[in-house]
Image (spheres, rainbow, N blue to C red):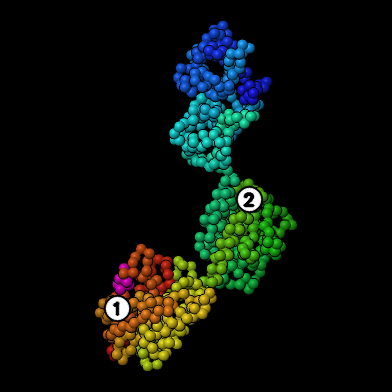
Amino acid sequence: MARSNIWEHGRDAPVPAVAVLDARGDVVGWSKAAGELLGYPAEGILGRPGTDLRMERDRARRIWTWNGGHGDDDYRVGMVDLRHEDGGQIVTHLERIRITTPGGAPAWVVAAIPASVFTLGTSVLEPLLSAAPVVMVAWDTDLRSVWRNERAQRLEEAFPCFRVGRPLPESPGELEPLVPPELIREVLADGVPVLDRESRWGGTGGESTFSTFLFRVEALDSRPLGVCLMAIDITHSRARERLALLRRASVQIGTTLDVQRTAQELTDLAVPAFADYATVDLTEAVLPGTEPLERLEAGDSGIPVFRRAGLASIHAGIPESLWPQGQPVYVPPRSPFTLVLESGRAHFEPEMDTSPGSWLDSDPDRARVIDAMGMHTLIIVPLWARGSLLGIAVFVRTDNKAPFTRDDLVLAEELAARAALSLDNARQYTREHDASLALQRQLLPRRLCGGDMMELASRYLPSDVHQGVGGDWYDTIPLPDSRLALAVGDVTGHGINAAASMGRLRTAMRTLAYLGLPPAELLARLDELYARQDEEEQGSALSPIAATCLYIVYDPATRRCSMASAGHLPPAIVDPGGGVSFPDLPAGTPIGLGLGAHRSAEVELAPGTLLAMYTDGLIERRDDDLGAGMRRLGAALARPDVPLDRLCAGVVDTMVTRAAEDDVTLLLARTPMPS
């Protein structure tokens, strides 16, 4: 019959206390070790019932319950509370084996050792496990604590169930911060271990994080003997800190599509968690709109190769940096920086070489700073993204005397790789944004043409929220019959496609306007043209989607305005006395749907009347409806005595008090006063 470790004691292991009980449960055999453990001499216990050795409480859970089915078991193991001769309690780990006497009667051999010395291995391992810097607790098959090491013993006040002899709590409250008791029961039942379960516990010294393991302890015949818990404090684990840094990088780097801000986010993340000083230097291709580096003259420190985009230090004022943000960075022709550029591989110096004959001989300024600040370990990592080398990231330690390791190099490369993708996204966005803005400004009228018919002013403000130029446009078109056409529109979408579609729509509108078509007919023709063009160019990158438009024709001879809307907001009309109204225009469908449902309306404008045409970006807010926005616009426009250009700027400043959520367009037209 397979036996557990209680029988397999070595030279230094405790000798089991052995007793033999007959079929009635009376003690008929008693070893010397049993007398030493429980205090009874053989002559004082032989012939007495074995139940006399039990403590009176909790009898139902004792292995020596000889009544019922337990009395017929061939084998039994568990925790048992025995009574010492002096009345004291001794918690033991006990095994009972059923035997048959020569006469054919059943009997039981019982062996017990104190639970305080019960181990999962040999006595050689117990000192090692007891002193291990991890929490270890063992429960038997009855889920009573049979052993815990020194680290677990220190936590007994917080977790009383760690005490030897204590049962696993039924309610989760006592053990829940580390592991739910139900999970321990599951491991005992199915033998499936729980590995690296992260848990947090707020002790007297603050919150700690543990990596918890649970596994079933089994005998050689796979019979379960109990469950062992092992909890490792990983609060200050370097591996965990690195993983946390990488998690922070995914959140804190690339929060905007601004190149310099993204570079600064990398250095802010690295200092002081990883380095004492960090910089990000980018090639001029990544920073458009700056002076070309090849036009700059070489200096004492070398040639201009980068521009400083991000820098951070543990020292106030960043004394380590020879160049502020945005300035050219000079490097010697033979230096680690140029080596990284040429090879595309990281440069790693656990101990910086500042000895005579190194590359620093040709860069005395850097040598001076390195010596003054105590720089002693260095990592330079290339910033690669989508096959392009964008620049380098530099990490240095000064006050932190630990040199960078190969693991640190891997972490630096991972941080750089994540930052490089964000930098490349920002670079591509900046290029498209600049191109879209340049295209839109080229397509919008450079000069408003109102002649003697109307005084004109306009403002256009690109969006800061949608990260792209939109399709807003405005136009003034002097017609051959001395009338003046005014238009404001908004193509859906943002970016270069929206700007290009806007330009095509504006050109088509001008062509139709010169034909002298009434507003409703012009919008219907434009809608038909736009829908047909959309159908012909299905799938094209420049294919338009939809647009709203307000088109007005003013006749100075009659002072009458004919106007029609294609899904656009009505104009604001401000009379000479400052009264503001919004005409109720017939609803019209947006351009591009091909429905052609547009109707005109007419109003007469008194001399000195102001007409305001705008896009929804001027009045629309997430926390406001359009009605509230139009009322705010009316209040801002009710200043008839203000010069038109100043009024136009003031209205935009009043209406847009934070980052514009959409492109903002405002066109003001005022009829002249009689001479």
**Residue occupying the point 58% across, 49% down:** 242
Q: What residue type is labelled 2?
A: Asp
Asked whether 110 or 278 is in front, the reply is 110
Q: In which quarter of the image is the C terminus?
A: bottom left
Q: What residue type is labelled 1?
A: Pro
| Neighbours of disc 2 within 10 Å: few (<14), some (14-19), many (20+) | some
Q: Is residue 674 above or below residue 263?
A: below
Q: Residue 440 carries which label?
A: none
Is 634 part of what is drawn in magenta?
A: yes
Asked whether 220 or 618 is in front, the reply is 220
**Residue occupying the point 42% across, 70% down:** 662
Which residue in the protein does label 1 denote? 583
Left or right position of 124 against 82: right
Residue 522 x/y as whole percent: 39, 85
Which residue in the protein does label 2 denote? 408
Q: Is residue 41 above or below residue 373?
A: above
Asked whether the viewer can see residue 32, the reply is no
Specify the farthest residue to the front.
104
Most common secondary structure along the magenta stretch: helix
Secondary structure, mark 2, is helix
Residue 240 x/y as whole percent: 57, 46
